[in-house]
Amino acid sequence: MNKTDSYLGFELGPIRPPSEAYSLLLRINRGCGWNKCRFCGFYRGVPFSPRSAEDIKKDIDLVKYWVDVFQGKEVSRQPKSEGDYEACYMAHHWIQSGMRSVFFQDANSILMNPDGMIEVLEYLNQTFPQIQRITTYARSDTINRLSEERLRRYAQLKLNRFHIGLETGNDYILKLMRKGVTKQVQIEAGIKAMKAGIEINEFYMPGMGGREYARQSALDTADVLNQVNPNFIRIRSMALAENLEMYEDYKSGLLTRPNDIETIGEIRLFLENLHGITSVVDSDHILNILLELRGKLPEDKDKMLGIVDRFLELPQEQQNIFRLGRRLGIMGNLRDLKNTVLTDKVKETMEKSSIDESNIDMVCDKLMIRAIPI
């Protein structure tokens, strides 16, 4: 879509990071400018198209109108369209959360023309001066193409946090999954952004390298993060859906799908090899088994390893109860194993559905896929 096209109304993209649950969502572009990663199906069939600065500013104006309505500064009217309803909902939700953060959608919003991005950022800050943080997904190769001066200007205008899909630091897996970057590119981008005053969230995807490359993936990813020292390291376990291109590698036998226990073993090796950094580690995604796995390095490293070991040292029966309980949404953390009401409910499900050691991996994998649209 170009600047001559008519404004189609307020738009929302399909996804955001879990940590942006309370942010105002503003759509900067539609789809993904790369859209080749074999582990991602979010934007397949969605043509990439940037939105104009003028259209984004109209979205901001619409949110501002509804914010003013809810704050008693404007006379209310009935929403006129689906986009108007979405802007109304966004404004209400954002007010409830304190109106402090904004997330730019869809993927890699920093592909936007830099002058257009500056125009949007200036207008957003002018309209909502109380904003403290503006964030976006960002690809490492795109970060490296932007000058440090440009990145510093973004940070000054409160675009001060990037969510980077590191996934793995292993070059073989990065190439196999068609990520389009190398380990070194990821390191350089993280260091460059942080030097410009931008906070970094690095996403690590345990399980991506299958059983075959789990060890090397954990070690190489830890090596990247030891060099970058990002503000946040967020764990997002791999979900293997049949509609993803990477599924062919598992179907053909090139890679072997690890189960939850093996994936947690990979996470332990990864954590064990994080050295000399001050990042916050968080397991804040629905696909992860150990949601309580969070802490600040280096002081909480032993605590986090203790949580992992507590799971790995459980009897197999208890591990399976917890795995199924998590995938069914019955259990949230390891202490739920002491709740007889919850454990009995999981055991009853296992008995009724004939779930045992022979099929629990398959059952958990299928439940995992249903937890998120990929």
Image (cartoon, grey):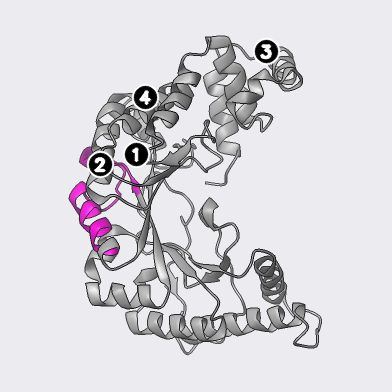
Q: Decide which of tag 4 and tag 3 comes sooner along the chain.
A: 4
Q: Amino acid at mark 4?
A: Thr
Residue named by callout 2: 276
Callout 3: SS: loop
User: Which image quadrant for residue 79?
Assistant: bottom right
Mark 4: few/some/many CA within 10 Å (<14, 14-19, 20+): some
Q: Relative to 184, does residue 27 appear above or below in the rendering?
A: below
Q: Decide which of tag 1 and tag 4 comes sooner along the chain.
A: 4
Label at residue 256: 4
Q: Please report the residue visible at 44 percent of the width from the left and 20 percent of the height from the top.
A: 309
Q: Amino acid at mark 1?
A: Pro
Q: Relative to 222, does residue 191 appear above or below in the rendering?
A: below
Expressed as whole percent of the image width and height from the top left, the position of residue 17 reads 51, 54
Q: Are marks 1 and 2 in contact (CB under 8 Å)?
A: yes
Label at residue 298: 1
Residue named by callout 3: 354
Q: Relative to 160, does residue 291 appear above or below in the rendering?
A: above
